[in-house]
Amino acid sequence: PRPILLTRHGESMDNVRGRIGGDTELSEAGGVYSKKLANFVEKRLKSERAASIWTSTLQRTILTASPIGGFPKIQWRALDEIYAGVCDGMTYEEIKKNMPEEYQARKKDKLRYRYPRGESYLDVIQRLEPVIIELERQRAPVVVISHQAVLRALYAYFADRPLKEIPHIEVPLHTIIEIQMGVTGVQEKRYKLMD
Ligand code: F6P
């Protein structure tokens, strides 16, 4: 069995401000997480010479990976966060107030709802296909540092969760989800590195 480690980036400045999307840097807590993650990964994958670190192309994941030494890092656009189109950079409150129909439509069908000029969960699931194929093909451990919506979809694939649950799966910040693919099926462990 080989582990796949899934984690969101460390807390970003947009997370602190409650803004969705964007491409901001890490907060102080996010920076602390990046160091704790590096420690964890370097210990956990010590003798795994072929392991690799996959990030999105957004700086909050690249910064989160940066303290990790000893493994190659690969950036995937397909691992970028769900794109909120015209709502990118807004808070949920702002969307509710300024675009109430959009807010309600998303609430009603979060899986299928597509942000104007942006993406839906179904779009994200579709663009993840090449990532999943490559993850399946890898024999060595992979650390995936990505974003909430994307990790919900990836996690659901490995944990065999139904499509309709995907937008509601809990993927908290500063937590590693370790998935072990073995002969007896999939095993899962969660490591919360910060309070
Ligand atoms: O708030 C962090 C974030 O990653 C946003 O960038 C993104 O729009 C959102 O989470 C996705 O979560 P939800 O689908 O619940 O809005």
Image (tube, grey):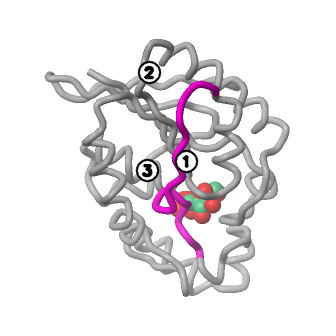
Lower position in the chain sequence, tag 2 or tag 3:
2
For disc 2, the marked residue is 49
Q: Which residue is at 25% across, 29% downward?
A: 186
Residue 192, image x and y in percent?
59, 25
- Judged from this view, the residue extending furthest toward the right is 28
Circle nearer the viewer, 2 or 1 = 2
For disc 3, the marked residue is 152
Q: Which residue is at 55% across, 86% downward?
A: 117
Q: Which residues are magenta?
A: 69-84
Circle nearer the viewer, 3 or 1 = 1
Q: Which residue is at 36% across, 30% downward?
A: 179
Q: CA distance from mark 2 to mark 1?
A: 19 Å
Residue 195, labelled with which disc? none
Does mark 1's beta carbon lie closer than 8 Å to ligand 1?
no
Label 1 Cα crowd, 10 Å radius (few <14 / some 14-19 / many 20+): many
Element carrying mark 2: loop
Element carrying mark 3: helix
For disc 1, the marked residue is 55
Dominant SS in magenta: loop
Label 3 Cα crowd, 10 Å radius (few <14 / some 14-19 / many 20+): many
Please state which amino acid type lies under the numbered disc 2.
Arg
